[in-house]
Image: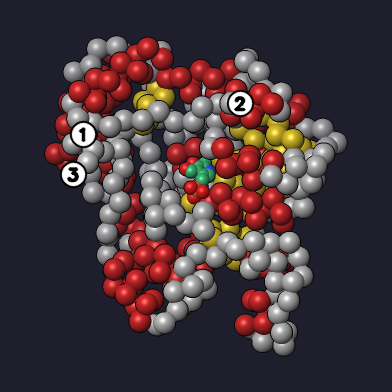
Amino acid sequence: MSSYGILFNRPSIIGREMEYVAQAVANSHISGDGIFTKRCHRLLEETVGVKKALLTTSCTHSLEMAAMLLDVKPGDEVIIPSFTFVSTINAFVLRGAQPVFADIRPDTLNLDIDNLERLITNQTKAVIAMHYGGVGCEMDGLMNIADGQGLAVVEDNAHGLFGKYKGRQLGTFGRFSTQSFHETKNFSCGEGGALLINRQEDIERAEIIREKGTNRSLFFRGQVDKYTWVDIGSSFLPSDMLAAFLLAQLEERDRIQAKRKLIWDAYYEHLKIWANDYAVRLPIVPPHCEQSWHLFYLLLPSLKARQALIAHLAEHGILSVFHYLPLHLSPMGRRYGGAEGDCPVAEDVSDRLLRLPFYFSLSPNEQSQVIEAICSFKC
Ligand SMILES: Cc1ncc(COP(=O)(O)O)c(C=O)c1O
């Protein structure tokens, strides 16, 4: 049992999750690609507006599929923001790529496009954009540079499902985008993900890679009379029970997002005076971005203040957590040449950022306790 009365995250049953899981079992189909998986695919394709959606076992696996689909090989360089989750780059390193770490913007904490061109070489294969907190990267600038240099763009959209940049859904800009349905995400089935595909010509190979390198999907559609090994691949299909759970959450997307917006707005409204008094920065969402209401963070004035606030909230029974450590300074990042000072904004932000409890079932009373505890803290 946790000693925290208010957790950082808590999974929720929102609607028909258990009914759908029971139906998947009753259908006698709990392996991959049953009717619930297909319904999730259709819903994602229609609501996000992508050519094809394929459920996977995690966002990590979707990123690994993207690396295989791009034929990333030893000698290729892949540019990623240093302030992201390890899977964003590990997927490409697994194929032999050299990571090239880019710094982030101080406002949205997304990839800094102004510094991108100097990182591009003849070996650069792809740029990975990660939409931090579901606030869009500067996609116009990024796509201009990438298209001009013939580079593939992959959007790691683990945080950003249904967020928009200049009115256009995140996940529709890059050649591929990847979603996470991990327990901590807005829509969840515990562990899960999706690969979203924006080019018709990538669909068939993606299906093959997802099905252990076989053309089994073509066989099930009657396009070939037997299926066999045709490419590299692995087992990236989630159980239809997970898809059933996820579908119930995706169907409640409006209710989930509306509730998360209320929570986000209440944090912002009730913390802004305190934040101003103590030089704490609250999240910045540019007017041309519609965020996905994924997380709420505080940027404290120093590492010492951040650590003291974590301890202060813990004394009030509240769990708050920091976020990514800069990848270029991790033991693996250093093996690839990362060093102090390479990405100064990521290094600075990583020390000072704190995320607050944020989940669908967070009650107004629990949120008031968090806000009161924070406002009683003097930085
Ligand atoms: C930006 C980002 N990408 C990828 C992942 C990995 O997601 P998954 O746990 O679904 O593999 C995470 C996990 O939180 C993440 O924050």
Which percent across, then down, holds residue 151? 76, 44
In the rendered image, which residue does mark 1 sit on? 3
Name the residue furthest right.
122
Question: Could you tell me the amino acid type at mark 3?
Answer: Ser
**Residue labelled 2 has its Cβ within 8 Å of some atom of ligand 1:** no
- The answer for how far apart the CA atoms under marks 2 and 3 are is 40 Å
Where residue 249 sits, quadrant-wise, is bottom left
Q: Compare marks 2 and 1 and give the one earlier in the sequence.
A: 1
Label disc, if present, on residue 74 of the rendered structure: none
Specify the color scheme: secondary structure
Q: Can residue 250 be spotted in the picture?
A: no
- Quarter of the rendering occupied by the C terminus: top left
Question: Could you tell me the amino acid type at mark 2?
Answer: Pro
Is 254 left, or right, of 165 in this rendering?
left
Find out whether the residues at labels 2 and 3 contact each other: C-beta distance under 8 Å.
no
Label disc, if present, on residue 363 of the rendered structure: 3
Comparing marks 2 and 3, which lies closer to the viewer?
A: 2
Is 136 left, or right, of 149 in this rendering?
left
Find out whether the residues at labels 2 and 1 contact each other: C-beta distance under 8 Å.
no
Q: Which residue is found at the position 49% from the left and 30% from the top?
A: 324
Q: Which residue is found at the position 27% from the left and 59% from the top?
A: 13
In the rendered image, which residue does mark 2 sit on? 331
